[in-house]
């Protein structure tokens, strides 16, 4: 699962640059594969954790290194945070994307202390096809666990 947040975290923490390339490259995919734990459950946790890190701590606008759990190993931070030297950044439209819907679904599950019924997830987005696609994608990526009775939760760690 190589979404924008994960690509940014890998670019900074491992490659040592501020931003990843505008479009995903073969080198990034290779790097992500070498870092992915072999065990399936651990790999799912790894994917969820790196997405969360990019969404909440190492964001595009503001990296929050003092509260980052991998700060001691981050290549970009250790190199003194060199400025971006690649081509200009493409403007990223976020509003209305599946990524936004996924983020909203994950936010509900993150805040819940018990499994969440489908109806509660349905309230996060008005468009049912896009909402279902986002939820299916999260389940397929191992980031959301469906339970009997139409309930959902984050995978247990
Ligand atoms: S130390 Fe800072 S730049 Fe590096 S991954 Fe963490 S938040 Fe991002």
Image (cartoon, rainbow, N blue to C red):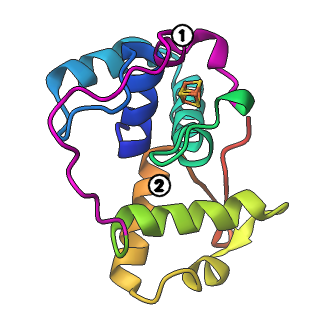
44 over 126 or under it: above or below: above
Q: Identify the residue at image location x=16%, y=23%.
A: 26
Q: Is residue 116 visible?
A: yes
> Is residue 58 in the magenta section?
no
In the picture, residue 5 is in which quadrant? top left
**Horizontal and vertical percent position of residue 119:** 63, 84
Please give the residue where the numbered disc 2 appears in the rendered image: 138
**Between tags 2 and 1, which lies in front?**
1
| Res 151 quadrant in image | bottom right
Instruction: Based on the picture, tell me whether residue 92 belongs to the magenta stretch.
Output: yes
State the SS at label 2.
Answer: helix
Query: In the image, what residue occupies the spot 32% across and 16% down?
Result: 31
| Magenta highlight: main SS | loop
Along the horizontal axis of the image, is 32 left or right of 65?
left
Q: Residue furthest bottom?
A: 126
In this rendering, does residue 135 appear at all?
no
Q: Is residue 100 left or right of residue 50?
A: left
Looking at the rendered structure, the number of numbered marks drawn on it comes to 2
Q: Quadrant of ligand 1?
A: top right
Q: Is residue 45 above or below residue 82?
A: below
106 lies left or right of 13: right
Q: Which residue is mark 1?
A: 78
Q: Earlier in the sequence, mark 2 or mark 1?
A: 1
Magenta-highlighted residues: 68-94
Residue sitting at 42 percent across and 49 percent down? 140
Q: CA distance from mark 2 to mark 1?
A: 33 Å
> Cβ of disc 1 within 8 Å of ligand 1?
no
């Amino acid at each position: 699962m190589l979404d924008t947040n994960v690509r940014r975290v890998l670019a900074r923490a491992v490659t040592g640059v501020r931003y990843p390339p505008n479009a995903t490259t073969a080198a990034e995919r290779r790097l992500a594969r070498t870092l992915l734990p072999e065990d399936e459950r651990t790999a799912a946790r790894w994917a969820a954790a790196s997405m969360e890190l990019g969404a909440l701590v190492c964001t595009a606008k503001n990296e929050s290194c003092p509260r980052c759990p991998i700060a001691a190993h981050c290549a970009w931070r250790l190199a003194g945070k060199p400025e971006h030297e690649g081509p200009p950044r493409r403007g990223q439209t976020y509003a209305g994307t599946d990524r936004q819907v996924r983020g909203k679904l994950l936010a509900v599950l993150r805040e819940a202390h018990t499994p969440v019924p489908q109806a509660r997830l349905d309230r996060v987005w008005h468009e049912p096809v896009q909402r279902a696609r986002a939820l299916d994608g999260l389940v397929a990526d191992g980031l959301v666990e469906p339970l009997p009775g139409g309930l959902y939760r984050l995978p247990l760690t």
